[in-house]
Image: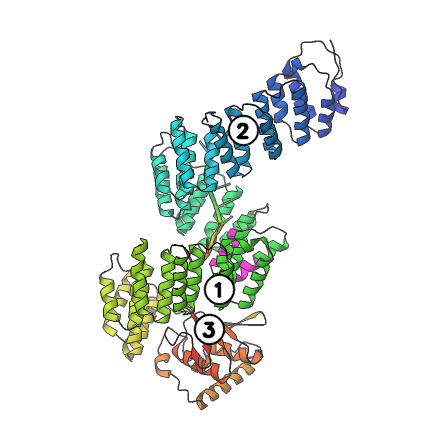
Amino acid sequence: MAFKLIFSSSFTSKIQKSTAFPIPASFFFNLFKHYCFSSPLGLDRCIEVDDLPQTYYSNSFLASIIDNCTHKRHLNQVHGQLVISGLQQNGFLMTKMVNGSSNIGQLDYAHKLFDKFCDPDVFMWNAIIRAYSRHKLFQDAIEMYRWMRWTRVDPDCYTFPYVLKACTELSDFRLSQLIHGQIFRHGLGLDGFVQNGLVALYAKCGHIDCARVVFDGLHDRTIVSWTSIISGCAQNGKAMEALRMFDKMRKTDVKPDWIALVSIIRAYSDVEDLEQGKSIHGCVIKMGLEDEPDLLISLTALYAKCGQVTVAKQFFDQMEIPNVIIWNAMISGYAKNGHAEEALHLFRDLIARNIKPNDVTVMSAVLACAQVGSLELARWIDDYISKSEHKSDVFVNTALIDMYAKCGSVESASKVFDHISNKDVVVWSAMVVGYGLHGRGLEAIDLYHAMRQAGVCPNDVTFIGLLTACNHSGLVKEGWELFHCMRDYGIEPRHEHYACVVDILGRAGYLDQACNFILKMPIDPGVSVWGALLSACKIHRHVTLGEYAADKLFSLDPYNIGHYVQLSNLYASARMWDRVAKVRVLMREKGLSKDLGYSFIEINGKLEVFSVGDKSHPRAEEIFNELQTLERRLKEAGFVPHTESVLHDLNYEEKEENLCYHSERIAIAYGLISTAPGTTLRITKNLRACINCHSATKLISKLVDREIIVRDSKRFHHFKNGTCSCGDYW
DNA sequence: CTAGGGTTAG
């Protein structure tokens, strides 16, 4: 018997001949592979040759055909051939078909084939589970696994890696434990692949202790095992632990590959250890991996997070293929390091280039807006988000709450808060912190009760918010009680919590109690605690205790300008001018100089910045006329400047010409001449409000009948009708 | 037929 293969063009010229049997299957395979699948056209013609005797379609031949299918049409045709040949119940080939369908994205087709297959064996089950897992339908993958067990087919060592992968994505700890048990029952507890899967799974579920148990029991730790445990620690906020594991790994023969390096770089950027991060960067270069796109992302994130935005930008610029993650790393890096303008510029650039932002991108843009502090900008991004698919993302909404609070509108923050359906502890905490920032302590506490009512358990950050809220509102008793509530939730107070309590007690004048509290602390009091005590001493003019605190601070943190400023302020408040001068000398010896004060005000969407006595603005003359008018009206209203203390108070802006030329006063004057009567003025300044400006602003708000909202370095002040929301307690 | 990574809120 002879037959003809009739193919198109080039093929025809090569082979158009009659031949006699037997022809080896490999001959057909090579022909098919080489010619049929190089173009869809070739295949169409090939399948038309259906008078090929079936005996020559060996399994491996057909399998190779299936492997080379690139289109659903190809699979259909092959399937047709299998049916004709009576091979539709051939497990090997049908498994190939399921794999093939899955590989080209035809999950529905895979499932149809699976459904038509009677009595699937473990290979077939593995194929369908893998198909669902690869298509991110993890719940379905688990369902298939359950069904498989129900049909009493035993899973093997190839089944579990995909089942574990699905569990990992679902982050279901109970299910993980269940499956772990089944792994043991099937005697697969010692399989390396399965064990590595378990390590990664437990780590992602947040049960790093379980991951460690599996990891410690591993006989053969490959780079995958190490990467799983290192990244697991890092993903659970235990970067130090991750790096300790990396140290252990270094003592073995296992060499890191690029995926391991990604995890290690992440751990170093989490702890913001730029030096160590740089040494890993060196490894990357040594291994010739610097062009690996995912390492570019990691390095960008590392340098950006550590504040080296210029270096980060160089890596960012090296990335040629559009990748939203590297944009996210760069945008959030800019936003977190005081380059909000660049962050937003990049965000707009991304949109202009038609790269699709994801939830993380818009969240980073929100962070940038929060940093700018402009309510108008805040409304713009909120508007953008409300029209997008990102409006339901909990990360985005949490950032929005924080942003509105930082831009001065607790009301808008609370509106966002109300619209979130499933509020987690971070959402509640963000709102609590928001109230705290504005000195609305009672509302913060009410929210805390509502949160418990809703069955959400507070965490350490919730209490930071509550304690700062109490602090900003002078709620001593409430703060003290809340601090002791932490124990009920099993939350170990951190330095910040202790510092808040010291702040609360100290500001309210309970200096002895604050001191006792510090002495009884179970952990060594750090900079924040002594700093709180020092500033309390400054308020209450307790020089000896303040000097004691300052002494501690100077040994703990000798190059921080803030502590010297505080001590100097303490002396100034006690009118000890000679000691003020001594501190200044000390500062000069250490080569420290204080930050310049500046204030922002936003008028018609444009941000204006003023420094002390700033005359650089085009409308400077009008501004200074307005300042003088204000000064005159203040005097007429009986305002007495707090000249003496302020002049020596290094915390605030340097004395230049006159107190009324402090930057926020210039910003207020500019705001008054640039906006319609009655418009609220919103000002942001980098330092804390000085006592003189604070008193003056209260009176100005009454004289000009304006609401003036000032965000200083610590909190918000809402000035209205002669009073301030802080109740002069800040 | 199998495993590990990157950006993210208070």
Q: Amino acid at mark 3?
A: Val
Residue A710 got which mark? 3
Task: Check the image and report above or below for A453 versus A685.
Answer: above
Residue A634 quadrant: bottom left
The CA span between labels 3 and 2 is: 62 Å
Task: Check the image and report above or below for A676 versus A281.
Answer: below
Task: Check the image and report above or below for A73 versus A562.
Answer: above
Circle 1 residue: A414
- Give the crowd class for mark 2: few <14, some 14-19, many >=20 residues within 10 Å: many
In this rendering, position of residue A5 left or right of residue A112: right
The CA span between labels 1 and 3 is: 19 Å
Q: Which residues are magenta?
A: A327-346
Please tell me if label 1 and label 2 are on a single chain.
yes
Of helix, strand and loop, which mostly describes the magenta segment? helix
Write the residue at 73% across / 16% down.
A51
**Viewer-nearest of labels 3 and 2?**
2
Which element is circle 2 on?
Answer: helix
Please state, as top left, top right, bottom left or bottom right, where the N terminus of chain A lies in the image. Answer: top right
Residue A127 got which mark? 2
